[in-house]
Image: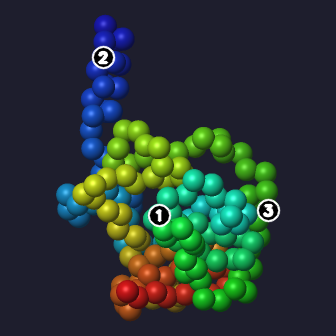
Amino acid sequence: MKKIISILIVTISSLSIAQVAIGKSSVSNSSVSLEFGSQNKGILLPWTASAASVTGAIPGTFIFDTTDKKVKLKLLGSWKDLSVDTTGVVDTSLQDSPAESANAQVIIGASTTTAPGILVLESTDKAMILPKVESPHLNIINPSPGMIVYDTATKQLAVFNGTVWSFWKS
């Protein structure tokens, strides 16, 4: 009986479409795959030794490049620098001997994927809503290098390189 229940739970889980809310009780609408609460916190991007060391990255991939201390976005065939200032100070000692599995991956929106990444949001009709923070340069007291948020005051993407915030508007 336990085997039947376990198989049934695994089957139902694999067929479900995931929507995840972090720091709040639910997502704001059906077009959201991942949404964050309204605390003064951001999402920390994966740290890599360099963009060149990231193999198989697909367009839409975000990383924090510790070599040149920049947040980067993968576009078709190249990496887009999202950090204006390159004087970031980054202590990589915690990353020098990582304890996580090389195959660690969380997938939201699909049961399987071929896309490489630590957090993969794969959906044809859903998007992630970044953490929203009013004036992150003033309200996030101790930001980490590679942090990314949406600034509600200026309506801009804000990225932190370890020293300064850079702001992007479409």
- Kindly indicate the quadrant of the structure image that contains residue 55: bottom right
> Residue 35: image x %, image y %?
34, 62
Q: Quadrant of the C terminus?
A: bottom left
Element type where label 2 sits in the image? helix
Please tell me whether residue 120 is drawn above or below residue 89 in the rendered image: above
Q: Nearer the viewer, residue 137 or 156?
A: 156
Label 3 close to label 2 by CB (< 8 Å): no
Residue at the image position 69 percent from the left and 77 percent from the top:
69
Question: What amino acid type is highlighted by mark number 1?
Answer: Pro
Residue identifier under label 3: 93
> Residue 100: image x %, image y %?
66, 45
Q: Nearer the viewer, residue 99 or 118?
A: 118
Residue identifier under label 2: 5
Q: Is residue 119 left or right of residue 28?
A: right
Label 2 close to label 1 by CB (< 8 Å): no
How is the structure coloured here?
rainbow
